Image: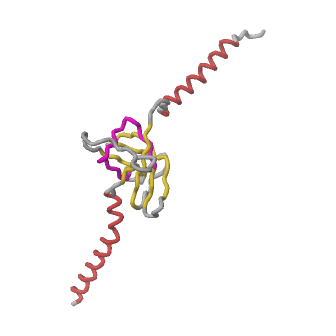
Amino acid sequence: METRANYILIGAFSAATVVAAFLFLVWLTGFEGDAELQTYDVIFDGSVAGLSEGGDVRYNGIKVGEVTRISLGADPRLVNVRINVDGRTPVKVDSQARLEFQGITGVAFIEITGGTPASALLEAEGDNDYPIIIADRSAVQQLITSAPLVLTAANDLLVRIDRLLGE
């Protein structure tokens, strides 16, 4: 005895399942086909260790974009990081960027902080293709930069204490 299967119903169900899975993946990734992006170049003086392409860009703690390129400029001390940010993000001429670290994992992201409401939006100047943000040093970067000086001063202090106690 042969079972009767409705092949059209099975095919329609299979096609609907594939379409539903595709739509779920699009929703899950947060794809916004019509999102307008603004590109900026952020210039860092020194290391950007922990930052990678695809890393987060946050504005006052809210994810607004990602890192698209990291490169060295003509001056090897400077690192040029290109970012794409949601076009609705109000990056002003007095906005500041810095490298921050998420928890103890060492994963770095770029944090852009406000600016005053009265200041103008940041725009490209001269022959630059994109607006440029000069990054500040974060507290962690300042600590890492000053660590050798602190250790040298602590070592000198211990040598002086040893001499004093030796007398």
Q: Quadrant of the N terminus?
A: top right
110 or 130: nearer the viewer: 130
Furthest residue toward front: 126
Q: Position of residue 147 (x, y in %)?
A: 33, 68
Q: Position of residue 25 (x, y in %)?
A: 53, 30
Q: Quadrant of the C terminus?
A: bottom left
Q: Is residue 140 rendered to the left or right of residue 51?
A: left
84 or 109: nearer the viewer: 84
Q: Residue at x 45, y 32 (%)?
A: 35
Q: Quadrant of residue 18?
A: top right
Q: Compared to 167, does 25 lie above or below?
A: above
Q: Residue at x 40, y 46 (%)?
A: 124
Q: Position of residue 22 (x, y in %)?
A: 56, 27
Residue 91, magenta (yes or no): yes
- Magenta residues? 82-101
Q: Residue at x 52, y 29 (%)?
A: 26
